[in-house]
Image: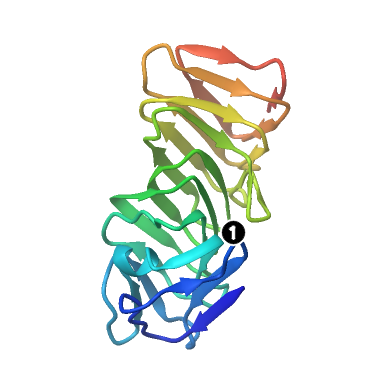
Amino acid sequence: GVTLTADNMSLVGGTVDAGAAIATLKQKTNGQLIDLGGADAAGTLGLSDAELDTVTAGILRVGDTNSGAMSVSAAINPGAAATLSLITGSSISGGANTITDTSLAFQAGGAVGLTTAVSNLAGTTTAGGITVSDTIGGTLSVTTVDGVVGLNSGNTAIGLTETTGNVTVLQAVNAGSSTVAITLDGANKLLTNGAAAITGTAGVTLTADNMSLVGGTVD
């Protein structure tokens, strides 16, 4: 594996090759902000899409539990790492800027709001809730990615929207004492609960034109 640690990085001039192992890009200073799609600045580690494309790895990890708030200021699509794993002790916000990859994991200490185009998704936060809008068009699987299992929000709300494709829940979606909403916007798309628990004891709302729920539970 390869680990690069610095508060600012300029990676476009060369390449980083971790093979099928893990490549990690992280800040040196605790609390340093991370801007995916943006530029370096005082207090901010910026990693543009072009810089992320220079990294070859089985898993590309960005940040660690000491990172500050993470933002996605422009669309990113790591070209040589099929799995992107985002880690911060704070929030992750992306707005309408899309993260495109095969698999995405995130671990946060604050609110998570992302727009994605991925086939495999897993994430956890300890506060602030999880809101993900995915546009993959095929099937989005809630599964295990980089050791992160399913979606877990620490008793805060989970909202997962698939705008065009199907959703298969292979690992637990757990909002604890808060709410879960899974919405499939596409016509005649299928929501499958495949042997997993969907938990939100303040309320669970599943919205899809087709559902297969026998494999799991909804609580």
Q: Is residue 165 left or right of residue 121?
A: left
From the image, which quarter does the C terminus lie in? top right
- Residue 191 in which image quadrant: top right
Relative height, residue 119 to residue 212 (above, below): below
| Closer to the camera in the image, 124 or 167 | 167
Q: Residues within 10 Å of mark 1 (few under 14, many from 20)?
A: some
Residue 87, visible in the rendered structure: no
Residue 39 sits in quarter: bottom left
Q: Position of residue 91 (x, y in %)?
A: 45, 63
| Residue shown at the point (41%, 74%) measured from the top left | 15
Question: Measured along the vertical axis of the image, is residue 152 above or below residue 12?
Answer: above
In-front residue for pair 58/86: 58
Lateral position of residue 119 relative to residue 218, left or right? left
Whether residue 201 is visible? yes
Q: Residue at x 38, y 66 (%)?
A: 52
Circle 1 SS class? loop
Instruction: Please give the name of the residue rendered at 52% of the width and 43% of the height, measured from the top-left corner.
Output: 157
Residue ID for mark 1: 126
Compared with residue 22, is residue 168 higher up or lower down, i.e. above or below?
above
Dividing the image into 4 quarters, which one contains the N terminus? bottom right
- The kind of residue on which mark 1 rests is Thr
**In the picture shown, does residue 133 fall above or below 194?**
below
Left or right: 158 in relation to 53: right
Where is residue 69? Give x, y as percent. Answer: 42, 70
x%, y% of residue 218? 67, 25
